[in-house]
Image (cartoon, rainbow, N blue to C red):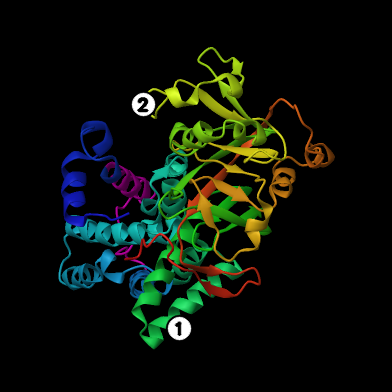
Amino acid sequence: MKLFPILCLLIVGMMGSARAQSPAMPDSLCAQLDMLARFYQEKPSGLFWYASTPGALALRRALRAAIDSAGVDGLQTDDYMPGNLVFADTIAAGTTDSERLKDLDREYTMAALAFGWDLFRGGEADSTVSYDGVSGRYALRDEQEVTGSLVRVRSAEDLQRWVAALLPSSHEYRLLRDSLTMYRWLGIAERQVRLVQALNSYRWVHHFPFDRVIVVNIPSADLRYYAADTLSLVMRIVAGQPSRRTPRFAVWCDGLVLYPYWNVPRKIAVRELLPVFKLAPEVARQMELQVVDGAGRVLDPAKIKWTAYTSQNFPYGIRQAPGCLNALGVIKFNLTDPYDVYMHDTNLKKIFASSYRYYSHGCIRLERPIELGKALLPDRLDTAYLLSCYRDQQPVSVPLPKPVPVFVLYNTVGLDGEGRLAWFKDVYRLGE
């Protein structure tokens, strides 16, 4: 979140309640002004950084020192305009005008709020995904968390504790942070850029008040499941081919489907299956594919004149019957993304042994889907039922009592299965 000090000060001074009086203003600016107003509701004198208390100078110095060290956590010091703060001190030293001091005080507060927001929420990490269906639900909570905790600061020591409390305390985060410090010292810019993204991404994902979260990282082709801030499960995945990329998003897993149908996307049906059926219609039965007309009736593939159809006039849907031959395996995880992408089991298990795992049409295949299912539905998933691969089953939808957030990210540095720093290939070439 970037604040605009001069504009904010003018608006606050002229309008007071910006959201109520200027609904046409951008929501982000309104949120910033709300945070500023909320902070000073707790300061009747209108002064905090320039209050007539012995610790005010030390408090200002502590904030400037923290901002000067923003690079340690992958932020840019200049984003918080440290020069403005120094200039504010120069002006304050030569004035007794209480209104002028209030303006200067707000300069410090806006810098502190912007810095705290980026520390807490990972800078602009949410902009690295193409769809975010999670953050909006927690925007007000985030504003209140950053502002409310700053309101409670009373001293330079409190401010240092405030900064520390906004950051993750996990081993994973500390390792990424220490690695950035090392590569800054070595002067290797390319690795610094990758670590900065990973740090901000980690803070964004882990600042939410979730008791469970699933994180999929495309470059490492793995999934991590966290419960109560503890890494509980790690598994390999298969992601989309470079020509059919898995999109990046933040969404919810709201339920599972046991013994799912695979409803073949039309593009795959007409581009990949139709040409095969024209030459060998029996392949449909061998793959346990069902042809469904517009009324939902299942047709006999052997009685269809496949050569009469093209990609333009093909009138049928194709789905694969449930079972262990199904491309989705025996369990599917519904996601609330707009791309019709989901996580699922697979009938091609050997693929997980490969170091290169980018073969899907965009969906996410899981190495150990039943383990993830059991984690999401403790004591409610019949493992024997799923492993038996029964034929002629009907899909069974099982909603989750509480949706679980799923973040599909693209970080080319992170931790390997042993908890060590690892660098991953930029398989989609997003860093070019």
Which one is in front in this view, the residue at disc 2 or the one at disc 1? 2
Q: Badge 2 is on which residue?
A: 312
Q: Quadrant of the C terminus?
A: bottom left
Amino acid type indicated by mark 2: Gln
Give the Cα distance between marks 2 and 1: 57 Å
Amino acid type indicated by mark 1: Met
In the picture as drawn, the residue positioned furthest to the top comes out as 295
Q: Position of residue 278 (x, y in %)?
A: 50, 31
In the picture as drawn, the residue positioned furthest to the right comes out as 384
In the structure shown, which secondary structural element does the residue marked by tag 2 occupy? loop
Q: Residue at x 44, y 66 (%)?
A: 159
Q: Position of residue 141 (x, y in %)?
A: 47, 44
Magenta residues span: 30-53
Q: Residue at x 75, y 27 (%)?
A: 392
Left or right: where does residue 327 sit relative to residue 140? right
Res 153 visible:
yes
Q: Residue at x 18, y 45 (%)?
A: 11
Left or right: where does residue 289 sit relative to residue 65? right
